[in-house]
Image: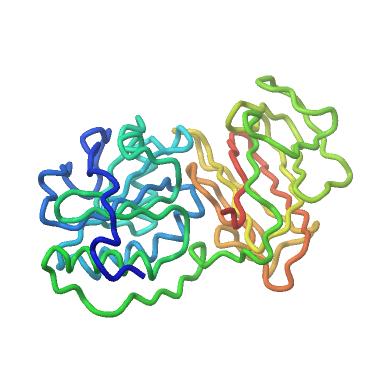
């Protein structure tokens, strides 16, 4: 680990905060106004499972060092268009208990100023406004907190001893990389792989799809009247379904009704049965749930042993958009 300040080279300057399209939880922050404070900049987007799992540690650091000259700034840079909707973002960060300032980065201005390419990404800024360290992806939380402490001490702050101890549960639980055999799977034709409905995809056209009798691992299929767009798939009529054969502890689906549309009920099955002890947080014991806005829904969390499973989600009403399956993706 780093022991001397010259082991943390200068990587750049804190720039670009003025390019945010909105600020939540705080008035707009500026580099000059942050001088004298250590700043931790956290890039994410609210449907990213990897950023979601990093959140407990970031939130804990924001709380622990709030009175010791640390400022945590979240940067919400959307992957999907609906993640730029302020109502969606405000609702999501409230539900996820994000209390620190958040720069909404709909135009990717802050992202570009940092030359960032990842969700999640952390940038560590010293009291002089210089970027001194970065970390991309999940993990290495102890090292990251030690960097925060080092920069605080460089700035003359007697930083609290010890490291936070997090035992996350629910959707933010540590990933089960050992059992991961299914990466994220996009449904829109721009990035889709593994589509297996009979007759193939009909991009940008309304079409009635039929699922095959069997799916191989990481194949997925539509049933019913859908329109496959470049990013989401849209169910036009009641009675549609999506099936996916996967191998992972967790399965999430980014979905929901478009803005101003009514909530969409759904029912989940696993290998043709109610998922039971494998149900995720967003379904009840009978496999039922409701998508009330566009976000990531946790539908499956399997107990051991983990194997290939056939996931099915049925929508009795039309109007849902679905974007991507996310499991324990890195």
Question: Which residue ends up furthest to the top in the rendered image?
Answer: 205
Q: Residue at x 75, y 34 (%)?
A: 224
Give the answer, above or below, for where 285 lies relative to 258.
below
Residue 298 shown left or right of residue 7 in the figure: right
Residue 271 shown left or right of residue 182 in the figure: right
Q: Residue at x 69, y 65 (%)?
A: 179
**Residue 163 vs residue 89, the one in the foreground:** 163
**Residue 100 vs residue 299, the one in the foreground:** 100
Residue 85 shown left or right of residue 178 in the figure: left
Quadrant of residue 181 within the rendered picture:
bottom right
Residue 273 shown left or right of residue 48 in the figure: right
**Residue 300 vs residue 118, the one in the foreground:** 118
Instruction: From the top left corner, tell me how far across and down residue 315 is, in percent.
Output: 67, 43
Give the answer, above or below, for where 47 lies relative to 141.
above
Give the answer, above or below, for where 193 lies relative to 160.
above
Question: Which residue ends up furthest to the right in the rendered image?
Answer: 213
On-image quarter of the C terminus:
bottom right
Question: Which residue ends up furthest to the front in the rendered image?
Answer: 6
Instruction: From the top left corner, tell me how far across and down residue 18 is, in percent.
Output: 21, 35
């Amino acid at each position: 680990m780093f022991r001397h300040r010259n082991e943390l080279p200068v990587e750049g300057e804190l720039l670009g905060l003025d390019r945010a399209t909105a600020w939540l939880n705080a008035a707009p922050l500026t580099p000059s106004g942050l001088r004298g404070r250590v700043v931790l900049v956290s890039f994410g987007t609210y449907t990213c499972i990897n950023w979601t799992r990093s959140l407990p540690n970031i939130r804990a650091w924001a709380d622990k060092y709030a009175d010791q000259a640390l400022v945590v700034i979240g940067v919400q840079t959307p992957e999907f268009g609906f993640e730029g909707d302020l109502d969606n973002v405000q609702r999501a960060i409230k539900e996820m208990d994000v209390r620190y300032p958040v720069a909404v980065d709909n135009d990717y201005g802050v992202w570009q100023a940092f030359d960032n390419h990842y969700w999640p990404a952390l940038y560590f800024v010293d009291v002089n406004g210089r970027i001194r360290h970065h970390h991309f992806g999940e993990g290495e939380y102890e090292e990251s907190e030690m960097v925060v402490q080092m920069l605080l001490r460089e700035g003359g702050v007697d930083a609290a001893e010890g490291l936070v101890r997090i035992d996350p549960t629910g959707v933010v639980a540590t990933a089960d990389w050992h059992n991961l055999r299914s990466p994220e799977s996009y449904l829109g034709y721009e990035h889709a792989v593994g589509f297996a409905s009979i007759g193939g995809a009909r991009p940008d056209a309304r079409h009635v799809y039929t699922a095959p009798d069997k799916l191989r691992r990481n194949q997925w299929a539509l049933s019913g009247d859908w329109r496959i767009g470049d990013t989401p798939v849209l169910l036009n009529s009641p009675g549609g379904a999506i099936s996916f054969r996967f191998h992972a502890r967790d399965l999430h689906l980014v979905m929901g009704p478009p803005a101003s549309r009514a909530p969409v009920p759904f029912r989940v099955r696993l290998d043709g049965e109610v998922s039971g002890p494998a149900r995720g947080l967003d379904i009840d014991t009978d496999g039922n749930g409701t998508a009330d806005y566009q976000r990531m829904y946790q539908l499956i969390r399997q107990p051991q042993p983990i194997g290939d499973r056939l996931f099915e989600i049925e929508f009795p009403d039309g109007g849902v958009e679905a974007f991507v399956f996310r499991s324990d993706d890195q």
